[in-house]
Amino acid sequence: MNNSTLNKIGWFLTFVLVSNSTTVMPFYFGSFYYLIIIGIVLYLIFKDGFHVSYSMLMLLAVSIVSIVLNDIPSFFRPWQRLVFFFLLTMAVGPSLVSPKAEKLKVDVFQKLFWFFPIVIIWSLVLFVLGRGSGAGGYFQGILVHSMIMGPVAGLTVLYCFFQFQVKKNRTIFQKVFYILLMAASFLCLLQAGSRSAVIGTILAMLVLLFVRDEKKLSNLIKNNFWFVLAIGLTVPLWTQYLDKLEAKNQDDSGLNLDSREVLWEQRLEEWKSSPIYGIGFSAVDASAEEGSTFDEESGKVETGNSWLCCLSMTGILGFLVVVFIFGSAFVSVWRLSRTVPLVSGLLLGVLTFFMAHMMAEGYIFAGGSFLNTILWLTLGVMITVGKNEELAIELEERLTR
């Protein structure tokens, strides 16, 4: 499989991911998405052999134990969800370890950040036309839900901020484009009404800044003075679009996440009932009076927090393995920060965004969902470039063209 074939697979997979998450694409792959993932995994294995990450094997083993040792209602479909989750992490995540698989992860990651601006620009057109609102009046643009728009808009803000840090000569057109794109992304972020996405975006930008100029405070101030000044001067313009966030905070005290408290408490109760291996992969306590939101027909669950979801479903064993995977990704990229600081800052920023956003959304094991795919893709890319500095340099060059 040469680079040309990998590139085509990367474009196709990226197109499939975006198509399944939008309302305007001419194709919706639906169940064919699963067949596509299976096909890509088999192709990678056939061309490059079967080499699996030990940490992901440990997570698989713990997940299997959590299913076998628990009596899980069949409508949760734990085996089906576990199989697809690991197939997905083999296709784009950290599970499959081979040169071709690693190149594909980096390729898809880069292409997604090319698609995000298209999503934002198209969504902005809908906003101007007074359209694009979804459930509850929250803005979703061309995406299927506002809770996807929040992260996509937040990551696009981070991407634009990343472009501001590039030292390469930029034309006036490029500078103006990224300024306008960042403003549009920030507008979509606020109108999506996702508080955790707003918090995650701010933290991600701070991490990018810190990594970019870790030991050069003077550069940090100089490079971002005008950027911060522009934000300050435009406060009256963007504060008028805080209505969606204010609506979510009507019953809360400040910008917090109290609306998830019942879900969080239930996850903790589930963990306490089975602290070692959890109550079962992809399951919640179906007998609970509150805090266990699920659909018996589809088996989908709403856990309210990915970290507590991991703890309740797979116990302390699964939680520790997941923490190890996140820690490995972080350390791998942090080591590159002195030689490739720009892309290291972006990757650590994306990881920081998800770590914050996951406090209010439980998609860590939701194999097939858009956010789950981007999360595990990011982890796979970070672990990959951490072992291969040449790929890190290549990724930075492709992102800053």
Image (tube, rainbow, N blue to C red):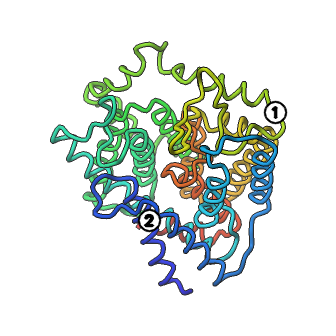
Up-down relation of residue 241 to residue 7 (above or below): above
Seen in the picture, residue 190 relative to 376 is either above or below; the reply is above
Residue 101 coordinates in the image, percent (x, y): 62, 73
* Identity, as a three-letter code, of the amino acid under mark 2: Thr
Residue at position x 39%, y 61% in the image: 114
- Judged from this view, the residue extending furthest toward the bottom is 2
N-term-proximal mark, 1 vs 2: 2
Residue where numbered disc 1 is placed:
275
In the image, is 69 to the left or to the right of 343? right
Give the x, y percent position of residue 226.
Answer: 37, 40
Q: Quadrant of residue 380?
A: bottom right
How packed mark 2 is, by other alpha carbons closer than 10 Å (few <14, some 14-19, many 20 or more), is: some
On the rendered structure, is 161 left or right of 27? right
Residue furthest out toward the right: 276
Q: Position of residue 264 (x, y in %)?
A: 63, 26
* Quarter of the picture holding the C terminus: bottom left
Q: Residue at x 29, y 60 (%)?
A: 25
Position of 166 relative to 106 (above/below):
above
Q: Residue at x 65, y 59 (%)?
A: 83
Quarter holding the N terminus is bottom right
